[in-house]
């Protein structure tokens, strides 16, 4: 390897191929059925934009040509995310090359990125069967500066079959949420770079502390209540843990590597993600039966899905921080609804004007503080 070539700590090609091999099979469909579903999703995604515009009042919804809409399968979603992770990890790799070049090269020589690539592939394989859609602002498409909106067709079909709901209604409902994310970044063109900056600071900070991961893992395990160390173990205290054996409030693996500076960075990113997810949830829930005739049934059955997860899946979700993401949906939705109820959607939309208008994590839980700070 050339001395000036950054080492590949993660074999991203291997990660993508591993995810494709390990991902559980989706619903069995003929080529004709797949083609019809893809066409239907594109049509519904386009139709949803006018509803997002009407509900949010954001002019960015009138023209979304800065980004792509693509319908993907599980393997394609995983490959796309290896591209995103590679971009997001680049600042940390660059920092390590500047500060610990010899250690980094030694680690790369020993592992060649294969072990970490396989591990990343296993994680992506699990996630690839859970994600319905995703807006990725960080990897620009070939034709414009914006990102790409991915709708994961087999997962959408799988969930609509599981819930036994009207397919067209469910697909439109999902599209409303995902198109809202696309509109958010179009309405706030500065948001992508703002998030990249803070993610870079966080990953660089975590890279500096990676050597203490084993010690932090050990301390975290010691802090578990007795009887909760195994997946599926019964909770000793409902206030501190649940039946998957991971302490309640755990934000996943990243929470093991937090210094005070890391916590501040993560707090800001948590607030931003809560805002984005909560806003999209409010939009998808703002539709009534005139737009999605069976929306009440969809909401009720979709919200009840989490109760049927097995102990192993619950453990993995908590370990990866997915439960924390679900809390972002809830916390962010409460914030957006409270602000809109108080000052209207036009007042809330000030949040997209500049970075200083983004709510803090404290304000997410106390919307009136944000309203006061904005002078509304």
Image (cartoon, helix red, strand yellow):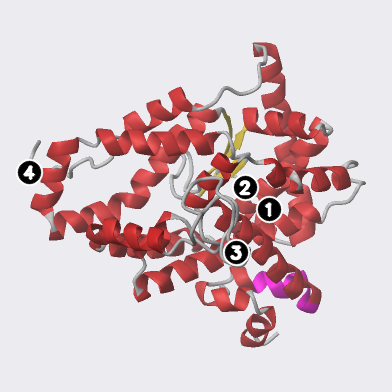
Q: Which residues are magenta?
A: 342-350
**Res 329 → quadrant:** bottom right
What is the CA distance from the residue labelled 2 to the residue labelled 1?
Answer: 6 Å
Tell me, yes or no, whether the two marked residues, 4 and 2, touch with CB atoms within 8 Å. no
Residue 237 spot, x, y in % from top left: 60, 64
Circle 4 or circle 2, nearest the eye: 4
Q: Which mark is residue 3?
A: 4
Q: Residue at x 78, y 38 (%)?
A: 170
Mark 1, residue position? 61
Residue 46 spot, x, y in % from top left: 72, 39
Mark 2, residue position? 64
Q: Residue at x 65, y 41 (%)?
A: 309
For mark 4, give the secondary structure: loop
**Res 161 → quadrant:** top right
Circle 3 or circle 2, nearest the eye: 3
- Tell me: 101 left or right of 174: left
Question: Which of pointers 4 and 3 lies earlier in the amino acid sequence?
Answer: 4
For mark 1, give the secondary structure: helix
What is the CA distance from the residue labelled 1 to the residue labelled 4?
Answer: 47 Å
Mark 3, residue position? 237
């Amino acid at each position: 390897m050339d001395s000036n070539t950054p080492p590949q700590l993660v074999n991203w090609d291997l990660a993508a191929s591993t995810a494709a091999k390990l991902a559980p099979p989706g619903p069995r469909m003929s080529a004709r059925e797949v083609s019809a579903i893809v066409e239907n999703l594109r049509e519904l995604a386009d139709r949803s934009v006018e509803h997002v515009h009407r509900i949010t009042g954001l002019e960015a919804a009138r023209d979304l040509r800065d980004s792509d809409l693509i319908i993907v399968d599980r393997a394609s979603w995983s490959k796309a995310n290896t591209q995103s992770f590679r971009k997001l990890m680049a600042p940390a790799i660059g920092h390590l090359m500047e500060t610990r070049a010899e250690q980094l090269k030694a680690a790369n020589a020993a592992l060649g990125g294969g072990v970490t690539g396989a591990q990343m592939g296993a994680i992506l394989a699990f996630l690839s069967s859970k994600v319905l859609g995703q807006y990725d602002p960080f990897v620009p498409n070939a034709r414009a500066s914006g990102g790409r909106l991915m709708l994961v067709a087999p997962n959408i079909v799988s969930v609509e079959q599981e819930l036994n709901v009207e397919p067209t209604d469910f697909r439109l409902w999902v599209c409303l949420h995902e198109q809202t994310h696309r509109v958010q970044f179009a309405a706030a063109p500065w948001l992508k770079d703002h998030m990249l900056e803070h993610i870079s600071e966080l990953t660089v900070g975590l890279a500096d502390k990676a050597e203490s991961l084993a010690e932090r893992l050990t301390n975290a395990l010691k802090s578990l209540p007795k009887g909760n160390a195994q997946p599926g173990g019964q909770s000793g205290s409902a206030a501190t843990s649940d039946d998957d054996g991971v302490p309640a409030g755990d934000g996943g693996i990243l929470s093991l590597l937090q210094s005070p500076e890391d916590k501040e960075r993560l707090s800001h990113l948590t607030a931003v993600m809560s805002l984005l997810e909560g806003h999209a949830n409010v939009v998808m829930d703002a539709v009534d039966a005139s737009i999605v005739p069976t929306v009440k049934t969809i909401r009720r059955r979709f919200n009840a899905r989490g109760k049927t997860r097995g102990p192993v899946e619950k453990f993995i979700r908590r370990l990866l921080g997915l439960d924390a993401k679900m809390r972002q949906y809830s916390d962010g939705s409460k914030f957006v609804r409270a602000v809109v109820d108080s000052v209207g959607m036009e007042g809330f939309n000030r949040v997209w004007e500049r970075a200083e208008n983004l709510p803090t994590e404290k304000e997410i839980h106390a919307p009136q503080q944000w309203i006061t700070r904005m002078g509304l």
